Image (cartoon, rainbow, N blue to C red):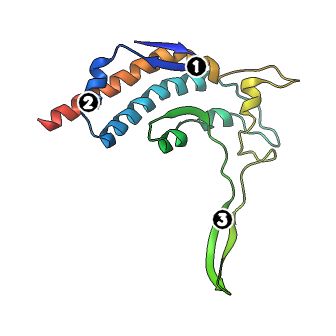
């Protein structure tokens, strides 16, 4: 059904699935594929959460279990812009600064927007809420050996493919039942 090459899964041998997808509108196709891809990605997410290293005690700038808590399935903005569907498992970064537009003025024909900081950024090395250091855990540094958790989670791609197929087939069958 699928094979793993260069950290990507290639699907083959699913002509019935492709045929069923061609009969759907683009909006339904994207909805079904997104739901199925997220189901497959959750399998990888679960494996990553089991493999992620967790600190034993809280420090001044680190929260134990933060990387594990921030692991998530996210939709790909690049794929969406290209008109495709894509998801990935990643560590969600802390929120950046939030700004609020208070007023827009026109002075001598120029449009001037007054923006004020609503909330300070949660990002940075001294923030307990920023798991930016996940890269160091995954890939290591000059002084620290790697303790990967995302790469080993990719070993669960065959189970993820099975979850993808199950959800996709169930969604198509549900559409067929509702159409009759």
Residue contact at pointers 2 and 1, CB within 8 angstroms: no
Residue nearest the observer in this picture, 72 or 35: 35
Residue at image coords 59%, 24%: 48
Residue nearest the observer in this picture, 43 or 32: 32
Residue contact at pointers 1 and 3, CB within 8 angstroms: no
Between circles 2 and 1, the one closer to the viewer is: 1
Q: Residues within 10 Å of mark 2 (few under 14, many from 20)?
A: some
Horizontal and vertical percent for residue 90? 60, 33
Residue contact at pointers 3 and 2, CB within 8 angstroms: no
The numbered mark, 2 or 1, whose residue comes first in the sequence reads 1
Residue projecting furthest to the right: 143
Question: Quarter of the image holding residue 64?
Answer: top right
Horizontal and vertical percent for residue 98? 65, 61
Residue nearest the observer in this picture, 143 or 76: 76
Horizontal and vertical percent for residue 42? 48, 28
User: Which mark is drawn over residue 99?
Assistant: 3
Q: Relative to residue 26, is residue 106 depicted above or below?
A: below
Q: Relative to residue 16, is residue 120 depicted above or below?
A: below
Q: Which residue is mark 2?
A: 172
The numbered mark, 3 or 2, whose residue comes first in the sequence reads 3
């Amino acid at each position: 059904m699928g094979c793993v090459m260069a950290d990507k899964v290639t699907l083959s041998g699913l002509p019935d699935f492709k045929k069923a997808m061609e009969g759907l509108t683009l909006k339904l196709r994207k909805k079904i594929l997104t739901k199925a891809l997220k189901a497959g990605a959750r399998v990888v997410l679960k494996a990553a959460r089991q493999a992620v290293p967790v600190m034993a005690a809280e420090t001044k700038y680190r929260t134990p279990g933060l990387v594990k808590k921030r692991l998530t399935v996210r939709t790909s903005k690049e794929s969406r812009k290209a008109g495709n569907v894509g998801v990935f498992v990643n560590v969600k970064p802390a929120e950046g600064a939030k700004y609020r537009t208070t007023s827009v003025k026109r002075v001598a024909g120029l449009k001037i927007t007054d923006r004020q900081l609503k909330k300070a950024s949660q990002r940075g090395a001294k923030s307990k809420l920023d798991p930016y250091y996940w890269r160091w855990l995954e890939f290591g540094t000059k002084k620290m050996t790697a303790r990967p958790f995302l790469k080993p989670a990719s070993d669960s791609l065959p189970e993820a493919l099975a979850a993808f197929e199950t959800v996709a087939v169930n969604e198509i069958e549900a559409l067929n039942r509702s159409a009759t």
